[in-house]
Image (tube, helix red, strand yellow):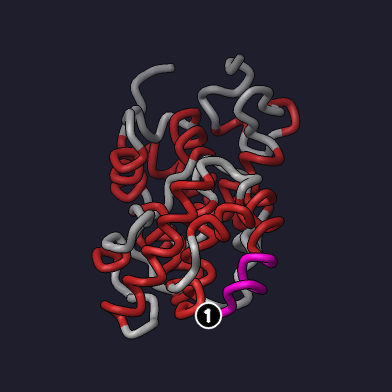
Amino acid sequence: MARESKKAKLERALEIAKRMNEHYPEAECALHYWGDPFKLTIAVLLSAQTTDKGVNKVTPALWERYPTVTDLAAANPSDVEEIIRTIGFYRAKAANCIKCAQMVLSEYGGEIPRDIDELQKLPGVGRKTANVVLNEAFGIVEGIAVDTHVFRIAHRLRFSKAETPAKTEDDLLALYPRDHWGPINHQWVLFGRETCDARKPKCDDCFIRDLCPSAGKTK
């Protein structure tokens, strides 16, 4: 593929965004959080290196046992571990859930902060989680949450060559106008699950095949 100009790359990116909007007009967060920003924060924290489906299986029992921030802050780590033990890294995540609840109580009056830097001070919360929480819970768009799906798709589309999610986000933010940032994560996650699979992408059935430099070349 010949070197792509900045203008051509932007035009391709905007056309992809247009088709994503047509294909996924109402893409939503796959995690269940019952409209509660704190529950969303914990769910996203738990989802690291684990499927959303797996998280959704354990959170109902978690919130039945610990319905409020105060309840979870006072929880015994072994009890939380037992509830979430079917997901990856459950011991570390149980500890972070409790520490996160304690900090939300002590530093933020029991409310999730609406600031990307403050959110990242919470135990277990990185920039990806902070972006998801701000966007989904508060409608605040400060960036693009780069999970494994977004990272993979950004590289297959040749929108980034960066080796880390943070630098990949920088590339996407530089490419897409700010008013396009909001839906990218949810749309690309769905696209990654349905079409642009990590191991066996369905290039023949892909609705952006003509815009993807990697189409038919990924093994």
Q: Residue at x 67, y 57 (%)?
A: 58
Q: Position of residue 6 (x, y in %)?
A: 31, 37
Q: Is residue 57 magenta?
A: no
Asked where in the image residue 164 lies, by quadrant, the reply is: top left
Q: Is residue 37 above or below residue 204?
A: below
- In percent of width and height, residue 78 lies at 53, 55
Is 61 magenta? The answer is yes
Q: Residue at x 34, y 45 (%)?
A: 169
- Between 27 and 66, the one lying in front of the other is 66
Give residue 4's quadrant in the image: top left
Q: Tell whether 87 sits left or right of 169.
A: right
Q: Reply above or below: 22 against 13.
A: below
SS class of the residue under badge 1? loop
Q: Residue furthest right?
A: 205
Percent of width and height locating residue 133: 45, 66
Residue named by callout 1: 68
What crowding class fits label 1: few (fewer than 14 Cα within 10 Å), some (14-19), or many (20 or more)? some
The foreground one among 184 and 3 is 184
Tell me which residue sits at (29%, 65%) in the image: 116
Where does the N terminus fall, quadrant-wise? top left
Give the amino acid at mark 1: Thr
Quarter of the figure that contains the C terminus = top right
Q: Main secondary structure of the magenta part?
A: helix
Q: In this orientation, does residue 195 appear?
A: yes
Q: Residue at x 51, y 24 (%)?
A: 213
Look at the image and give the residue range highlighted in magenta. 60-68
